[in-house]
Image: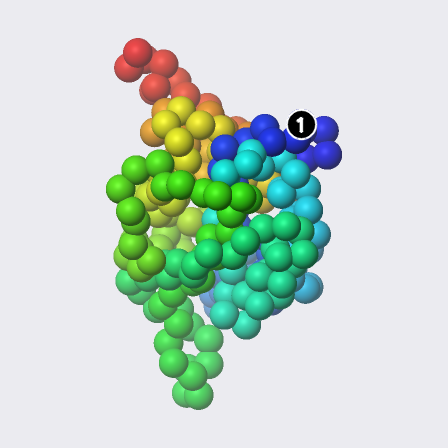
Amino acid sequence: MKEMPDNSVDAIVTDPPYGIDFQSARRTDKTKWKPKIANDKSPYIWFLPEAFRVLRDGGALLCFTRFDTENDFRWAMKLAGFTTKSQIIWDKQVHGMGDLTGDFASQHENIILATKGRFLLPSKRPKTIVSVQRVSPSKLKHPNEKPIELMEYLIKAVTPRGGLVLDMFMGSGSTGVAAIKNGFEFIGIELDADYCKIAEARIGAVQTVQEELV
């Protein structure tokens, strides 16, 4: 991001490490466990000043988080210059595991809407609860993979037509696939080389389809 110019992207839709040291898709056979993601020992808030710099005036940030680390992200967003506007709830339709005998079954994740300057919705006003079924554990390409349908909804909710979307925690490329599929430009950044290859292949396949349709 440090190589990107100021005010150069229209929207940021991203899913940083929450700081919960999470390991997804646990099974009896430990060889099938998804590896933990990097930088997940504490809430990874350090990208926010650069995110604010590269986002255009009037742009929006949608940042996934979780109830127990959300305040850390909100605090860091305000320090970076963002205005936090609202909380969006992603209803996964299927609950996870966790403490089976001492806690409610978790079925949602939180998303923070933060803005740089005066943000105006590009189209119809979206609702704060989005119900999209999570990716089945058996089909996950990344331990924190988000469904394409969800990312399409979020991107279209905050990005002007044909605008440039940034995801600096690209993972397996769901944000990029959703952006290209709907006619947006996209920049993705990913630390893990293996996930970067998966993302490139997925996004490249969508680009090929879009070019054939033109």
Residue ID for mark 1: 5
Q: Position of residue 197 (x, y in %)?
A: 57, 32
Number of disc labels: 1
Q: Position of residue 79 (x, y in %)?
A: 67, 56
Q: Is residue 211 above or below residue 167?
A: above
Q: Position of residue 5 (x, y in %)?
A: 67, 27
What is the three-letter code of the residue carrying label 1? Pro
Residue at the front extreme, as displayed: 118
Q: Residue at 33% x, 58% y: name it.
A: 128
Q: Residue at 40% x, 24% y: name it.
A: 162
Residue toward you, 170 or 5: 5
Q: Secondary structure at mark 1?
A: loop
- Report which quarter residue 110 is drawn in: bottom left
- Name the quarter where the C terminus is drawn: top left
In the shown orientation, is residue 160 left or right of residue 129?
Answer: right
Residue toward you, 57 or 202: 57
Q: Residue at 41% x, 87% y: name it.
A: 101
In the shown orientation, is residue 118 left or right of residue 191?
Answer: left
